[in-house]
Image (spheres, rainbow, N blue to C red):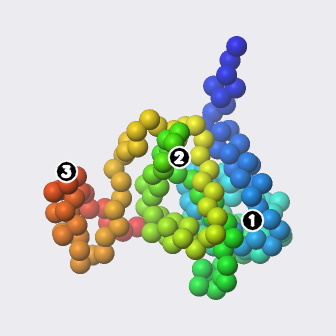
Amino acid sequence: MTDSRMMSGPVDRKVRVARAALEFLRAGTILGVGTGSTVNAFIDQLKDWGGRLAGAVSSSEASTARLVALGIPVLDLNDVPDLDLYIDGADEATRQRQLIKGGGAALTREKIVAAAARNFVCIVDDTKLVDTLGRFPLPVEVIPMARNLVARELERLGGRPAWRPSW
């Protein structure tokens, strides 16, 4: 007997978790939207929600473009009185629900929109599950004046910092 998870590819899995996240939406919601491939699958599922959402606050230019293409108004967080729900993916997750986010460089915006929302729903499929977090280098937010200081501290802790220019 074949496990149904083995039959579907990563894209099918992303679509399934994206569809499952729709159950958290309510008419009139101002929705916070993250970024990444799983969120792209979620945004694609919003095509029938365009007229029912009050709008969306996006954590990236890529997600903004997808939302606008569906006719969903993208709002500035400063103009939103309340953000009911934030939906985003994760780069890695454990079965204990520990997550790594921000590998795609939208970390700061993602954290701000997530902090503004009353509820955060993280959508991940089993391709993101790992036993131990940390398969790839993690971004660390640093203001320019503290770059060398932070690099020295990371080295002191055993890290190997590498400068990635801002996107």
| Other-residue count near label 2 (Cα within 10 Å), few / some / many at <14 / 14–19 / ≥20 | few
Callout 3 amino acid? Gly
Mark 3: few, some, or many residues within 10 Å (few <14, many ≥20)?
few
Please identify the quadrant where the C terminus is shown.
Answer: bottom left
Which is more N-terminal, label 2 or label 1? 1
Sequence-first disc among 3 and 1: 1
Disc 3 target residue: 158
User: Which percent across, then down, holds residue 94?
Assistant: 49, 41
Q: Amino acid at mark 1?
A: Leu
> Can residue 135 be seen?
yes
Asked if the residue at tag 1 contacts the one at tag 3, i.e. Cβ–Cβ closer than 8 Å, the answer is no
In this picture, residue 91 sits left or right of residue 16: left
Q: State whether residue 11 appears in this view.
A: no
Image mark for residue 87:
none
Label 1 and label 2: CA atoms lie apart by: 31 Å
1 and 2 marks in contact (CB < 8 Å): no
Q: Nearer the viewer, residue 36 or 146?
A: 146
Residue at (59% x, 58% y) in the render = 88
State the residue position of label 1. 70
Q: Is residue 40 above or below residue 95?
A: below
Q: Secondary structure at mark 2?
A: loop
Query: In the image, what residue occupies the spot 16% across and 63% down?
Result: 152
In the picture as drawn, the residue positioned furthest to the front comes out as: 96
Q: Kindly identify which residue carries mark 2.
A: 97
